Amino acid sequence: MRRNIPEFGPVHVITRGNNRQNLFSADKDKTYFCSLVRKYKEENNIDVHHYCLMTNHIHMVLGIHLESRLSRFMQQLNICYNRYCKKILGFTGHLFEGRFKCYIIENDLSLLFRGKYIELNPVRARIVAGPEDFPFSSYRYYAFGTEDCLVTTSPAFINLSPDEEARRKIYRDFVVDEKSILENS
């Protein structure tokens, strides 16, 4: 059965460990996965707007273009990371729980809320006290301007303000209190 993938625009992609098992046992595993994302996003004309690598699942908001190959991108990530786990971690069997889930994001406000949802995942899971404490997400890029070679700036983020520092403050406030984005836009 074919997936409903748009020709262009943002999508929220989720992939989980089989039976919700861990995908990552150490930071080096997440670092390796990020290197795969970097490699295959270029090859498949995909933009990564937001991401968060949790222990047993992955969230990404991806920008799709007319020439993008989302299914191929996800297949390459999953196959290469599965090989890594088999070789390095001694893993056997299926690592991922079936095919990835893909949700179309309709507008800029929805894109901002998806980013917020994704970047607050480690806080809700009580892994960290604040999103700035979690190194494997896009939050630091948007909130503080920390360099992140995975991220292509979200158009919704750019539209928050013409001033870069103001944009970051609006975003930080938004992640903490969702009312602030509505008051500042």
Image (cartoon, rainbow, N blue to C red):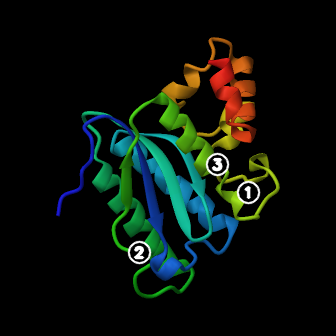
Which residue type carries mark 2?
Answer: Glu
Q: In the displayed structure, would residue 154 be above or below residue 46? A: above
**Mark-to-mark CA distance, 1 and 2:** 24 Å
Tell me the quadrant of the picture where the N terminus can be found: bottom left
Q: What residue is shown at x 52% (from left), y 60% (from top)? A: 58
x and y percentages locating residue 125 in the rendered image: 70, 64
Tell me the quadrant of the picture where the C terminus can be found: top right
Q: Quadrant of residue 50?
A: top right
Q: What residue is shown at x 66% (from left), y 65% (from top)? A: 28
- The answer to whether any part of residue 150 appears in the image is no
Q: Which mark is residue 119?
A: 3
Which residue type carries mark 1?
Answer: Val
The answer to whether 6 appears left or right of 54 in the picture is left
How many numbered circles are shown? 3
Judged from the image, the secondary structure of the residue bearing numbered disc 2 is: loop
Q: What residue is shown at x 56% (from left), y 21% (from top)? A: 158
Task: Rate crowding at label 1 as few (under 14), some (14 to 19) or many (20 or more) other CA atoms within 10 Å.
Answer: some
Circle 1 sits on which residue?
A: 123
Name the foreground residue: 21 vs 44. 21
Judged from the image, the secondary structure of the residue bearing numbered disc 3 is: helix
Q: Earlier in the sequence, mark 3 or mark 2?
A: 2
Q: Which mark is residue 41?
A: none
x and y percentages locating residue 114 in the rendered image: 53, 44
Q: Earlier in the sequence, mark 1 or mark 2?
A: 2
Judged from the image, the secondary structure of the residue bearing numbered disc 1 is: helix
Name the foreground residue: 142 vs 86. 142
Q: What residue is shown at x 74% (from left), y 34% (from top)? A: 172
Circle 2 sits on which residue?
A: 97
x and y percentages locating residue 108 in the rendered image: 48, 29
Q: Quadrant of residue 147?
A: top right
